[in-house]
Image: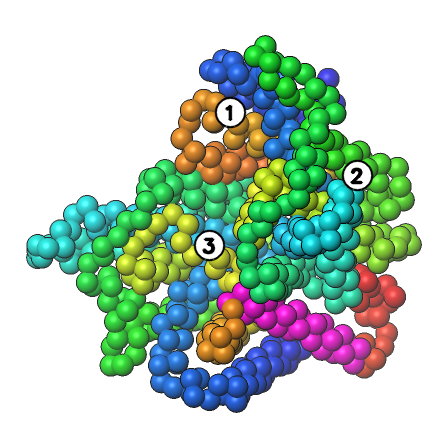
Amino acid sequence: MKKLFQHHETYLVLIILVLSAVITSINANFLTAENMFDMMKSNSFVGIMAIGMLLVLISGGIDISFAAIATVGQYVMALFIIRFGGNIFIALALSAIVGTLLGMINGLLIYYFRIPSIITTIATMNIYYGFLIVFTGGKWIYSLPDWFRKFAEIRLLTFYSSRGIAYGLSVVTFIWILVSISAVVILKYTILGRSIYAMGGDRKSSVRVGLNIFLTETFVYSFMGLLAGIAGVVQALLVQTVAPNSIVGKELNVIAAVVLGGASLAGGKGSVFGVILGVALLAILRNGMTLMAVPAVWFEFLVGFVILVSIGISSYRGKKKSTQTSVIEIVMEETSCLK
Amino acid sequence: MLKMKISVDNEIKVLSLILAGVIILMTVLSPRHFLRFETFQGIAFQLPELGLLSLAMMITMLTGGINLSIISTANISAITAALILTTWIVPEVPASTDMWIILIAIIAALGVSLLVGLFNGFLISIINIPPILATLGTMKLLQGVAFIVTRGYVISGMPNFIRFLGNGKVVGIPMPLIIFIVCAFLMATYLNHTATGFNIFMFGSNPIATLFSGVNNGRVIIKTYMISGLFSGVAAIIMMSRFNSAKAGYGESYLLVTILAAVLGGVKSEGGFGRVKGLILSLVILQVMSMGLNFLGVSAFLTVAFWGLIMIGAMISHFIIEQRNQLRLSSGNSGSSIKYKGK
């Protein structure tokens, strides 16, 4: 029991339960399967990007460019399937490949030139997005093919509500679940995954242990790009339009969700389960506000409040702990050996 | 110490070269438009608000932190001032008390921005939240407050004096430029000639060493973020004056540009290094570029892409220069220092 309370996730589950109880007591529609499945569907694209961000944060980096990558992937996909047709697998593969390539550029720049990841990705975000707008003229795309629309409506499980309306597990949510499972497998059961944790925990030590830092670092950013590409298609599936400004600008929301889930910006910490809880917390907050008829203007305020309180508590506990067991770190000559 | 001096001077040299290059390029590409008085005046009016925000960003980056809440701080300060001004001043009926109300409004705006800075500093130093998250939280909180207060509407109609601060001229020099130069000078003096300024650099290089040399780290951080807030507040007044209004969500695209400007100007994001001079040079480069490309009919988005490319180019050249320096240093004095270098 005591051990359970050492985990960040436990607190998150508690917060979510309390929040859900409050919302349900005001509007009973919250705790219906219909609403739950609906929330899982509409948040899947944030969830997919959050998984990618998790790996980047665990490795000790950060990526600001993923929203731009997702938009680029989305556009390339939409232009291709409108002109040449195809099917959903081609669409996903195309966007994923574009995303992976752009993510790989980030990773290579960060690895070879040791530019701080936040700087690199701010720069590449501007580059990717700038060129995208110039080449496409920033036009909105509405005329997506019919099969694209039909795919988004596929449900893997179907239920009927008392009023006869169909609902269930959307295929979009299923993509999110697949992505989450693959991330768990990579992080827990592969050398690559363990080296991501090791690199984020202590880069120098992991070099000396002989881990392949080049592979790890490039993989993390490429994987972020891959998931951004997939998330771009998922977002297009959800709203059935492709617009230049629909994803860009939401970078910090995704990072907030991941950090709420217990990932540390210093690297080496974080779990897939935590990230899903973080995404869920923000989703429930937004959904609950609508159901409780709280004006939408309060959302940003509450998000800020939740971030500060939840991270504040864990940071303050960390500080308390570190004053009890004082560790003096000896910083030695750096740079050249870090590579 | 000596090594640091050399690399910083290189920084200024490289930036000046880039600036000269950009100006020559723009002159060659569009001689009729670019080399005109109006062009430079346009730059002089546009530079200050971005410049003040970049200074606000820079001082936090010197400590190895970051302040994502500068734009929202500016907006909340501007909204505070605008609310005071529009409630108590009737534009059609000039009254003798107007000047006092304007003064109160400006002080209120600066006060709010200082309070936000204090709050950020408290979160970072006392609660121990990493700067990027603390200021992200504050940013969301303030955006929320701004929306709640204004309901998303624009508060417009500023008195003449406020409009003068952003649009007027004194002996041919744009007023915002004067404010910016004064602020930049104050910032440079503060950083280079006061104890706190020295501690800010020291904290950025090595917080543990700073603590052990008897510095109150918490106070340094709180001061840093308060000053960052204050500069956002000054930027708020200029922005409010130039837009002739205040609104939640103004200027949000500036946020990443300020980081870009600071980094291009030689501020290390890990902290400890950076100069106001370099920052100003990089700001001028960015402005000249966007102005020149604008004349060429290039889309604003392509300009932003070019900024990104320049930034990556600058970082790569830093890396190469640094590696060469290190090679020279380590081949110069072989022995003890090399042993610890790993490979």
Q: Are marks 1 and 2 on the same chain?
A: yes
Judged by its main secondary structure, the magenta piece is helix
Q: Residue at x 46, y 54 (%)?
A: B252
Q: Is A108 displayed left or right of A209 in the figure?
A: left
- Point 66% across, 40% down: residue: A146
Q: Residue furthest top?
A: A162
Res. A330 in view: no
Subunit under mark 1: A
- The magenta-colored residue range is B300-329
Q: Which residue is mark 2?
A: A183
Quarter of the figure with residue B330: bottom right
Q: Which mark is residue B252?
A: 3
Answer with the quarter of the image where residue B32 lies.
bottom left
Image quadrant for the N terminus of chain B? bottom right
Q: Residues within 10 Å of mark 3 (few under 14, many from 20)?
A: some
Task: Inspect the image, locate mark 3, and give the three-letter code of the amino acid beneath it.
Answer: Glu
Q: Of B123 and B193, which appears nearest the observer?
A: B123
Label 1 – label 2 distance at C-alpha: 29 Å
Image location of residue B338, percent across then percent down: 84, 70
Count residues near mark 2 (Cα–Cα under 10 Å), then give few for <14, some for 14-19, many for 20+: many
Q: Is residue A190 left or right of residue B74?
A: right
Residue B325 is covered by the magenta coloring = yes
Residue A84, compared with residue A24, is above or below; it is below
Label 1 amino acid? Gly
Give residue A288's mark.
1
Between the residue at mark 3 and the residue at mark 2, the CA separation in whole angstroms equals: 33 Å
